[in-house]
Image: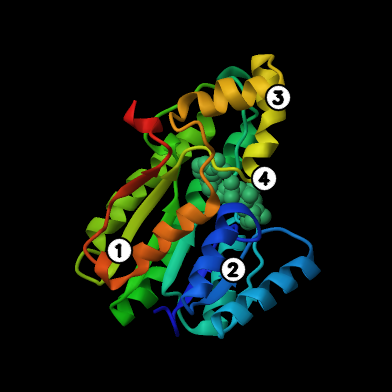
Amino acid sequence: FLKGKCALITGSTSGIGLAYARALAAEGADIVLNGFGEPDQIQALCEELAATSGGRAIFAAGDLTKREGTEAMVATAMAEFGAVDILINNAGMQHVAPVEDFPVEKWDAIIALNLTSAFDACRLCIPGMKAKGWGRILFTASAHSLTASPFKAAYVSAKHGIAGLTKTLALELATDGVTANCISPGYVWTPLVENQIPDTMKARNMTREQVINDVMLERQPSKQFVQPDELAALAVFLCRDAARNITGANYSVDGGWVAQ
Ligand code: NAD
């Protein structure tokens, strides 16, 4: 049902973003990938996605910690497809440290990537959506858009910002056929989660098993990691016409985390 629609997904060379790309391609969408990775692996992903969709899939490079990176990424998508119909702001990073030791450059990078790049991508893609009278803006927020954990000052601040941006966009675009929603996962088994285990071990003086069971899954009542394809299934639903009146919502997919 997405044939002829262009989906730009930030941070889609890995993890949750790649799951969104695969699920939207399976519905026929043209895909614009973004993120870091080996050129031949990215090329192989583009070929896989184009074969799945029967359409096109391209890579739009851009380091989204920099405004020029976001602008270059959107410009590449526009040059190929004319407009972006579905924008998923997904790229994100984490750093775990007590606030008084939090490296200021990590704060700046996390706010830039997790919050500012999403604002910039929206700002640049919305005119094309308004012109067509149809658009879908999604964000990968987090349970940390609704609640906090210690040692994640920048991440929690940025994700709460995403929740606010989502609501603001929903109001601004309510009569334009464009919806804005965020998806707020608990712990999803991806490289981002795996990579924060060593820092959490250090910050809390714990073993790997203690971090997984006592910190991560401790707050997830289901005691299971969320899988990326569960988030992708929700994203596909939110792109359907049946979801045209769902806007400004924050969907928890967290095994019950924020119900506590
Ligand atoms: P991941 O590390 O597997 O993927 C991150 C993606 O972002 C990769 O494609 C990477 O190349 C890209 N990226 C990183 N820095 C970038 C930059 N400067 N510019 C452009 N691209 C960049 O992570 P993931 O777990 O799939 O996370 C995706 C999103 O989901 C993030 O916003 C994250 O905060 C959010 N999230 C993840 C979890 C989880 O448990 N994994 C939970 C809640 C929210």
Distance, label 4 to label 1, CA atoms, is 29 Å
Determine which residue is flagged by label 4.
Answer: 191
**Could you tell me residue 52's position as x and y percent?**
58, 78
In the image, the residue with mark 1 has its CB under 8 Å from the nearest atom of ligand 1 = no
Horizontal side, residue 127 vs residue 199: left or right: left
**Could you tell me residue 129's position as x and y percent?**
35, 75
Name the amino acid, label 3: Arg
**SS under mark 1:** strand
Looking at the image, can residue 152 be seen? no
In the image, the residue with mark 2 has its CB under 8 Å from the nearest atom of ligand 1 = yes
Give neighbour class at mark 4: few <14, some 14-19, many 20+ (Cα, 10 Å): few
Name the amino acid, label 1: Thr
Determine which residue is flagged by label 2.
Answer: 73
Nearer to us in this view, 50 or 139: 50
Name the amino acid, label 2: Met
- Residue 18's quadrant in the figure? bottom right
Determine which residue is flagged by label 1.
Answer: 179
The mark nearer the N terminus, 2 or 1, is 2
Name the amino acid, label 4: Pro
**Could you tell me which residue is drawn at 74 percent across and 72 percent down?**
44
* Label placed on residue 243: none
**Could you tell me residue 120's position as x and y percent?**
47, 59
Q: Foreground mark, 3 or 1? A: 3
Distance, label 2 to label 1, CA atoms, is 22 Å
Determine which residue is flagged by label 3.
Answer: 208
Dots 4 and 1: beta carbons under 8 Å? no
